Image (spheres, rainbow, N blue to C red):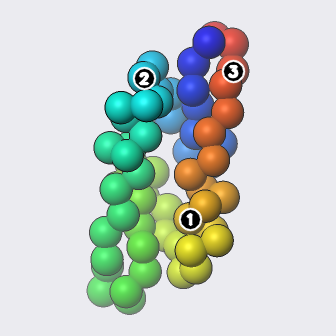
Amino acid sequence: MKFVCDVCSAGLSRPATNLKRHHKFLFNEEQEHSCWYCERDFNRSNNVMIHTAFSTKCI
């Protein structure tokens, strides 16, 4: 079993320790939040919540 990000499909072997590290959001020039890992931008907090949803998948 491995935790996989539903949006950018990044695999995390230890989600408890890597979840916060994986989703670091930075402010760009348009003042939007951007995930440093998959570089996806978000305008609203609800989109961030959807983006940070993780599921388990067999590999």
Looking at the rendering, which quadrant does residue 58 occupy? Answer: top right
- Seen from the viewer's position, the closer of residues 58 and 19 is 19
User: Which tag, 1 or 2, sits closer to the chain's start?
Assistant: 2
The answer to whether 55 is drawn above or below residue 46 in the figure is above
Q: Position of residue 2 (x, y in %)?
A: 57, 18
Mark 1 belongs to which amino acid? Val
**Number of the label disc, if any, that sits on residue 48:** 1
- Seen from the viewer's position, the closer of residues 11 and 54 is 54
Q: Position of residue 31 (x, y in %)?
A: 37, 86
Task: Answer left or right for 28 relative to 55.
Answer: left
Residue identifier under label 3: 57
Q: Residue at x 69, y 21 (%)?
A: 57
Q: Secondary structure at mark 3?
A: strand
Task: Sort mark 2 into few (<14), some (14-19) or many (20+) by Cα contacts within 10 Å.
Answer: few
The answer to whether 30 is drawn above or below residue 55 in the figure is below
Q: CA distance from mark 3 to mark 1?
A: 21 Å
Q: Position of residue 39 (x, y in %)?
A: 42, 59
Task: Answer left or right for 39 relative to 5.
Answer: left
Q: Residue at x 61, y 61 (%)?
A: 49
Q: Residue at x 50, y 35 (%)?
A: 10
Residue identifier under label 2: 14
Task: Sort mark 3 into few (<14), some (14-19) or many (20+) by Cα contacts within 10 Å.
Answer: few
Task: Look at the image and tell me in which quarter the C terminus lies.
Answer: top right
Q: In this orientation, does residue 26 appear?
A: yes
Q: Secondary structure at mark 2?
A: loop
Q: CA distance from mark 2 to mark 3?
A: 13 Å
The answer to whether 24 is drawn above or below residue 33 in the figure is above
Q: CA distance from mark 1 to mark 2?
A: 21 Å
